[in-house]
């Protein structure tokens, strides 16, 4: 199972926000090497970790690439769309 | 076509026959979704599949999509500028294109955009993209050739960027 980073930050000093997932969906057009490179650039992941997520997208159709606060999740989705990956945000279960 | 790296700052595509040179010149037009709804939908995809996120989808269209359009356009402008320097050899009509290494990221992005827009516009299936089909003429066959050629260039440029 692919490892994901869960970032927890406090709001107003005490309350912890609901975590949100950044999900990348499979797209048969985007090249595998391109997708890995985007994960490295956007999240600063190691080559190994980026490839692990890329393979998960390729084989399972989706991968949760990041989990954390909503605002940052939105910003990551925007960045991923800038690289033309199919990315969405969803509430973490 | 030949690919070379004469120095650290430059990559060169040479011996491009007239067809490949034309395909290269077509990158900016192919990357433009134009009036194709499916191409536009692919380039500006939704940030959520949740029906309850109507506000997010609305804001996304209003504020994020225009910013994304600027990012996409900036890559295409780099490609257009490089293509203006496409050199045609008088002896055989083949073309040569030199690209600065610092411009390869824009090329990778623009080629990707063109491939995505073409596949969406022509509704190619995964099987069509994987199967080797000879060029038979016609818009659809030409578009499939473009998708393949641009994919090869993307791989070459990515390999250079990765230092392999």
Image (cartoon, coloured by chain):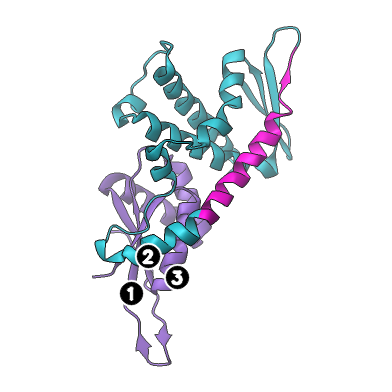
**Residue drawn at (43%, 42%), measured in percent from left and top?**
B40
- Magenta residues (range): B66-89
Relative height, residue B35 to residue B62 (above, below): above
* Display colour for chain B: cyan
Whole-angstrom CA distance, mark 1 to mark 3, is 10 Å
Instruction: Check whether the beta carbons of the residues at disc 2 and disc 3 lie within 8 A of each other.
Output: no
Q: In this rendering, would B132 be left or right of B75?
A: left
**Residue drawn at (49%, 59%), measured in percent from left and top?**
B64
Residue B54 placed where, x, y %? Answer: 32, 63
Chain whose colour in the figure is purple: A
Q: Secondary structure at mark 1?
A: loop
Q: In this rendering, would A91 be left or right of B140?
A: left
Relative height, residue A50 to residue B6 (above, below): below
Residue A65: say if magenta: no
Relative height, residue A65 to residue A11 (above, below): above
Res A72 label: 3
Q: Are the residues flagged by discs 2 and 3 from a single subunit?
A: no
For residue B136, which quarter of the picture? top left
- Within 10 Å of the Cα at label 3, are there few (<14), some (14-19), or many (20+) other Cα atoms? some
Badge count: 3
């Amino acid at each position: 199972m692919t490892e994901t980073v869960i970032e927890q930050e406090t709001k107003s000093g005490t309350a912890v926000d609901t975590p949100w997932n950044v999900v990348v969906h499979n797209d048969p057009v985007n090249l595998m090497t391109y997708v890995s490179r985007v994960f490295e650039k956007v999240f600063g992941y190691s080559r190994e970790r980026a490839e692990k997520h890329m393979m998960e997208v390729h084989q399972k159709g989706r991968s949760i690439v990041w989990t954390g606060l909503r605002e940052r999740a939105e910003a990551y989705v925007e960045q991923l769309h800038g690289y033309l990956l199919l990315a969405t945000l969803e509430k973490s279960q | 076509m030949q690919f070379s790296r004469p120095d650290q700052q430059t990559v060169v595509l040479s011996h491009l026959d007239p067809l490949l040179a034309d395909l290269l010149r077509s990158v900016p037009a192919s990357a433009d979704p134009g009036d194709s709804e499916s191409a536009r939908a692919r380039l500006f995809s939704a940030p959520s599949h949740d029906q309850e996120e109507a506000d997010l989808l609305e804001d996304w269209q209003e504020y994020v999509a225009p910013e994304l359009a600027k990012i996409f356009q900036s890559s295409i402008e780099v490609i257009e500028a490089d293509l203006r320097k496409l050199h045609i050899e008088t002896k055989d009509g083949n073309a040569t294109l030199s690209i600065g290494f610092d411009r390869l990221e824009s090329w990778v992005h623009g080629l990707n955009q063109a491939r995505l827009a073409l596949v969406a516009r022509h509704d190619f299936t995964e099987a069509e993209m994987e199967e080797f089909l000879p060029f038979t003429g016609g818009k659809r066959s030409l578009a499939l050739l473009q998708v393949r050629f641009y994919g090869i260039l993307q791989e070459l440029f990515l390999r250079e960027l990765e230092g392999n």
